[in-house]
Image (cartoon, rainbow, N blue to C red):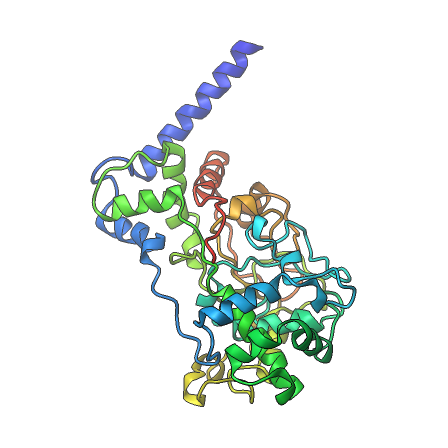
Amino acid sequence: MRKIVGMASAAALVAIFALAQVVSAGGQAGGWNAEQRQRIASLSLAALPPLPADPSNAVADDPAAAALGKRLFADTRLSANGKVACATCHDPDKQFQDGLAVGHGVGTGNRRTMPIAGTAYSPWMFWDGRADSQWAQALGPLENPLEHGSDRASVVRVVAEHYAADYAAVFGAPVEAQPVDRVFANVGKAIAAFERTILPGGTRFDAYADAIGRGEASALLSAEETAGLGLFMGKGKCLDCHNGPLFTDNSFHNIGVPATPDDLGRMVGAAKVQADPFNCLGPFSDARPEQCMELAFIKAEGEELRGAFKTPSLRGVSGRAPFMHAGQLASIADVLAHYNAAPAATVGHSELTRINLTAEELTALAAFLDTLGSDEPNGD
């Protein structure tokens, strides 16, 4: 029996080595061609540009606002039962998510908690994109009956009782001098100022990508992981949606994941963000209309929006099971099997086509995804 297992292991190693040789000799100088090296370098955190401005939030980069937002983020008094904070579902010790299939606040939600790191780079928030800024997103859960279950008057009361001096210092007026809706919006802006400081941490892949980008050899990835990287950029078609340093296109796609008939994803989210009084063009935004181009040119109609959900970042993905917008897939292996099979969608029409990866290729691709780390995000 031991001999048979040894032979099987040896066969697997031979297959992986052969796969690595076919896909690339990435650990050797010149093993990747110029186009591949450029593509690999584009995925490194070193290629991440500076934080984009948020003209809709005048205190977005104010350290005092971020300090206030950090305290609000952890305050359970902003919930109906006094037990739920933003940090309850966006746990700093779990990549600012909760590891559950769907979120649990005052009640049980119907979608997966999304991680926060790097969301300042995204024009749309939530799985369906129903908010167009971090501060607008922060307000939704406060009044959602399944999340915080509170209301804006109660939120303002907490701020007046426990944060009056800090609020006035950041926003230039005492709580009682401003309308409830304005204070409520400012609570979101303070939380967003904190969330902007939450960025993904570097990984072994980043060190490898930086070396390859400089034209150097690197042994930081194994043959199997290197093969997986080649598949990620090529046959696996992963870069179609998971591109750039954050491994997301920040767009919406129907990939045939089982969904309830009433969850239409982006089709409903697009209408909601347009109607949101806290959007970039709304009365509580600090932006000029010409600074709200994403919202002005939003794609809000089309059958392709039905059942489409936001592409999540793959950074830290190996530590973030279960997967998809409602935790439908339990493991990375299940996710890759889903993409490989490309099943028909239960809602709308899937964009996927079969990619027919072999068992060895699927294993290599999973190994590469693990190099993106489960590192804790950087945050102040």
- Estimate the x, y position of residue 82 in percent, counting from the top left: 76, 63
With respect to residue 6, does 161 lie above or below?
A: below
- Closer-to-camera residue (366/377): 377
- Closer-to-camera residue (24/356): 24
For the point 48% across and 85% down, the residue is 286
For the point 59% across and 69% down, the residue is 128
Q: Which quarter of the figure is the N terminus placed in? A: top right
With respect to residue 365, does 147 lie above or below?
A: below
Q: How many marks?
A: 0
For residue 19, side relative to residue 7 (left or right): left
Does residue 304 appear in the picture of this structure?
no
- Estimate the x, y position of residue 139 in percent, counting from the top left: 63, 74
| Residue 178 in which image quadrant | bottom right
- Closer-to-camera residue (67/213): 67
- Estimate the x, y position of residue 203 in percent, counting from the top left: 40, 45
| Residue 332 in which image quadrant | top right
- Estimate the x, y position of residue 53 in percent, counting from the top left: 40, 74
- Closer-to-camera residue (86/39): 86
With respect to residue 193, does 350 lie above or below?
A: above
Does residue 175 appear in the picture of this structure?
yes
| Residue 191 in which image quadrant | bottom right
For the point 61% across and 74% down, the residue is 269
